[in-house]
Image (cartoon, rainbow, N blue to C red):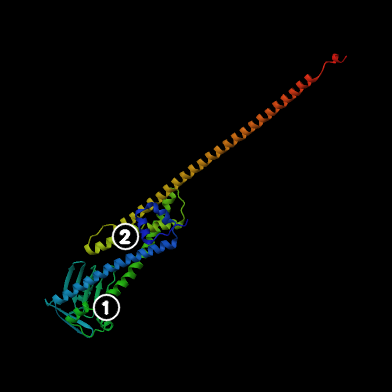
Amino acid sequence: MKKDKLSFFKKIKTSIFDFDGYQELAAEKISRTIAYIVLLMLILGIIVSFVYTYQIYQLIDQAKNYINNEISEIIYENYEITVIPNNGEEITENDIDNIITAKIIINTQTTDQEKINESIDKIRTQNNGILFLKDRIIIKNELSTNLMEYSYKSISEEYNINKIDKEELINILTGKNIYVFLITFFVAMLIYIFIVYISSMLIDILLLAILAYIVTRIAGLRLKYSAIYNIATYSLTLPIVLNIAYIVVNRFTGFTIEYFQVMYIAIASIYIITAILMIKSDVIKKQFELNKIIEEQERVKQELKRQEEEKREKEEQERREKEREKERQKRKREEKKKENGEIGKEPEGDNA
């Protein structure tokens, strides 16, 4: 009877909680296994992208509050902006430590390239941050070592902004255009994370498949390469789920686990070794059951042979008995005839 195909969520449950189920997962088609890991990576990418997009939203909200409370005037002319803080300083820095840790630097009044470069270097060393310069804005996100630069000219032309002052900038940061930016950021982040994660995952699967191959040889199993690939792939399910949870917790609480990547690979390795040993145990069990069946078949065969021999011996005995009985009956008839013949013969003297 044809087995029902496992659903995506059934595969997740089986690969995490059911080591016995790895035998069924190993028998999956490669195409279905690839589709499984791609879908899992897509879910991971969506969750992580949403988290980072939400944090960017929080960062923009913090910037809006900072501008509203700490900035006295904003002047925008010829695609250049000048921000004058309430404290009157030329360069101001504000550290944010709320949902995310970030730095906001405003350096729009100076034309000193050395001071501008210092501000850029400060943002570059941050995990997250925003740098406002006279002609452009620079955003740093911890997912990338590269800075994202947007000139005010390109922003003005793209969003049809001709005037920027304090009130207008706050309106921009709270208007619908910011949601367009967030959606664009989410899509770009999703594509980036998916490509990075799927590339990393292919390397992990290759290394784990080598481990699985070695374990199968040591265990004395001969599995197809496709089965080894499947086992290596499904063994990453729990580490990926834990990775999703860890990223979410880390982004919102700052909680970190040292050597998480080592634990990530260690969990997958444990799953591979355990799954292969379970398959080996199942093979031994089936072999033992097969041997018992063969032994039982041999016993039945011997019993049937014995019964057949007994039947033949009995038939032979009955045949002999019949022959002996026939022989006795024959002798008995002959004796009777002989006896009858002697009785019917008269003496010769009686005829005189």
Q: Which residue is mark 1?
A: 150
Q: Residues within 10 Å of mark 2 (few under 14, many from 20)?
A: some
Three-letter code, disc 2: Val
Q: Which residue appears farthest toward the right when viewing the image?
A: 352
Q: Residues within 10 Å of mark 1 (few under 14, many from 20)?
A: few
Q: Is residue 223 left or right of residue 345?
A: left
Q: Please tell me which residue is depicted at 66% across the width and 32% down the height of the picture.
A: 319
Distance between the alpha carbons at the discs numbered 2 and 1: 35 Å
Above or below residue 190? Residue 154 is: below
Q: Image quadrant of residue 256?
A: bottom left
Residue 236 location (% of width, % of height): 36, 58
Q: Image quadrant of residue 56?
A: bottom left
Above or below residue 183? Residue 288 is: above
> Mark 2 or mark 1, which is nearer to you?
2
Q: Is residue 290 left or right of residue 122?
A: right
Task: Give the camera-side residue of 238 and 135.
Answer: 238
Q: Is residue 240 visible?
A: yes
Secondary structure type for disc 2: helix
Residue 309 location (% of width, % of height): 60, 35
Q: Please tell me which residue is depicted at 17% across the width and 72% down the height of the picture.
A: 93
Instruction: Tell me the quadrant of the picture where the C terminus can be found.
Output: top right
Q: Is residue 110 left or right of residue 52?
A: left
Residue 70 location (% of width, % of height): 14, 75
Q: Which residue is mark 2?
A: 241
Secondary structure type for disc 1: strand
Task: Give the camera-side residue of 108 and 237.
Answer: 237
Three-letter code, disc 1: Tyr
Above or below residue 15? Residue 153 is: below
Q: Please tell me which residue is depicted at 29% across the width and 58% down the height of the picture.
A: 260
